[in-house]
Image (cartoon, rainbow, N blue to C red):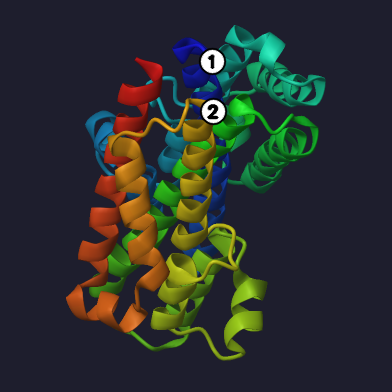
């Protein structure tokens, strides 16, 4: 498989996964904005999305309207929803012959609709409708590649990209709640704190999963354990890294068993998550643990690029 083809498929999946994560962050921020400090909620979404510096450089003070517009449609934000859809379509078009018809229709159809969209579609009063459309786009693409692609090297790079992006997003969402919102909020353990943590579960579609696993009220350490260590949850860091290792093993087998730094990094992180305990993570510092995972996930992406895509 050509390095250019691997890179296009890898980033196609990452951009589609990113728009899904952005829509979930924005939905959680809007839901919680009516119950607490609106600016703090939207600032947390900007931080989790990694675009706070760009926002502050352009706008300064955070307001819900500006944050929603910046995350959704601002042309100066490279990670806005509309920009990510544009980049996804560029990568899909570059490898049109490697995509199934359903995959191409999902990406190209979303791009055609997105071309007719702009800042007005991310106004707060119409935002829920727009975010529902974004999640439909990402769900359609995920269903298309999971049910129509041959299980070959191309599929492995698509799944690898989606899994790395999902791991990064889950870690960021959890870290923002714990490190940014919690220390500034004086009512820890109160009703608002309960809704804050529930909003994080909702952002990763894990409210029902939490109820099934714990059968208890929402508690921070249980939420952290579910999102970090539980393999049953598809968006947990453990599940994502299990998928990453599986994809890299499959790709290595297709290349005569040759391995590199990216395989070592992925295997080491997967082992830490497989044998980790939430009590040890909290004792050493949840924020420090999540920050390290975010940094190592970025390092892993760079190592994959250096070995397979240069």
Residue 113: x and y, percent?
A: 72, 21
Answer whether labels 1 and 2 touch (C-beta < 8 Å): yes
Q: Residue drawn 42% across and 38% down?
A: 66
- Give the class, few, some or many, for how many residues have Cα within 10 Å of label 1's Cα (few <14, many ≥20): few
Q: Residue drawn 53% across and 49% down?
A: 243
Q: Nearer the viewer, residue 104 or 307?
A: 307
Residue 7: x and y, percent?
A: 47, 19
Residue 117: x and y, percent?
A: 64, 23
Q: State the image quarter where residue 19 is shown.
A: top right
Asked which secondary structure carries label 1, the reply is loop
Q: Residue drawn 71% across and 18% down?
A: 108
Q: State the image quarter where residue 162 is shown.
A: top right
Q: Nearer the viewer, residue 185 or 218?
A: 218
Report the mark closest to the observer, 1 or 2. 2
- The answer to whether residue 44 is seen in the rendering is no
Q: Residue drawn 60% across and 82% down?
A: 213
Residue 155: x and y, percent?
A: 63, 31
Rendered view: 68 above or below 157? below
Rendered view: 225 above or below 138? below
- Assign the N terminus to one quadrant of the image: top right
Disc 2 target residue = 254
Disc marking residue 64: none
Left or right: residue 195 versus residue 96 is left
Of all residues, the one furthest to the bottom in this rendering is 216
Asked which secondary structure carries label 2, the reply is helix
- The answer to whether residue 123 is seen in the rendering is yes
Disc 1 target residue = 1
């Amino acid at each position: 498989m050509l390095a250019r083809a691997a890179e296009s498929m890898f980033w196609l999946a990452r951009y589609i996964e990113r728009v899904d994560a952005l829509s979930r962050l924005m939905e959680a921020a809007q839901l919680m904005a009516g119950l607490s400090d609106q600016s703090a909620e939207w600032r947390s979404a900007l931080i989790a999305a990694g675009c706070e510096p760009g926002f502050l450089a352009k706008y300064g003070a955070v307001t819900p309207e500006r944050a929603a517009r910046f995350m959704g449609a601002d042309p100066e934000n490279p990670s806005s929803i509309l920009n990510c859809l544009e980049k996804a379509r560029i990568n899909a078009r570059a490898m049109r012959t490697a995509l199934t018809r359903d995959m191409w229709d999902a990406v190209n159809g979303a791009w055609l609709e997105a071309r007719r969209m702009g800042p007005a579609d991310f106004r707060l009063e119409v935002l829920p409708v727009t975010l529902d459309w974004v999640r439909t786009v990402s769900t359609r693409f995920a269903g298309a590649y999971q049910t129509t692609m041959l299980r070959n090297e191309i599929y492995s790079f698509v799944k690898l990209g989606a899994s790395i992006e999902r791991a990064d997003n889950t870690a960021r969402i959890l870290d923002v709640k714990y490190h940014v919102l919690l220390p500034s909020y004086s009512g820890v353990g109160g009703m608002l704190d309960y809704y804050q943590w529930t909003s994080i579960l909702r952002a990763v579609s894990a409210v029902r999963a939490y109820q099934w696993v714990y059968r208890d009220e929402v508690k921070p350490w249980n939420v952290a354990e579910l999102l970090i260590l539980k393999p049953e949850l598809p968006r947990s860091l453990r599940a994502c890294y299990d998928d990453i290792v599986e994809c890299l093993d499959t790709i290595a087998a297709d290349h005569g068993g040759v391995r590199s730094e990216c395989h070592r990094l992925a295997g080491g992180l997967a082992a830490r998550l497989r044998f980790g305990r939430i009590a040890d993570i909290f004792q050493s510092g949840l924020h420090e643990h999540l920050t390290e995972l975010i940094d190592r996930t970025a390092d892993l992406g760079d190592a994959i690029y250096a070995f397979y895509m240069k």
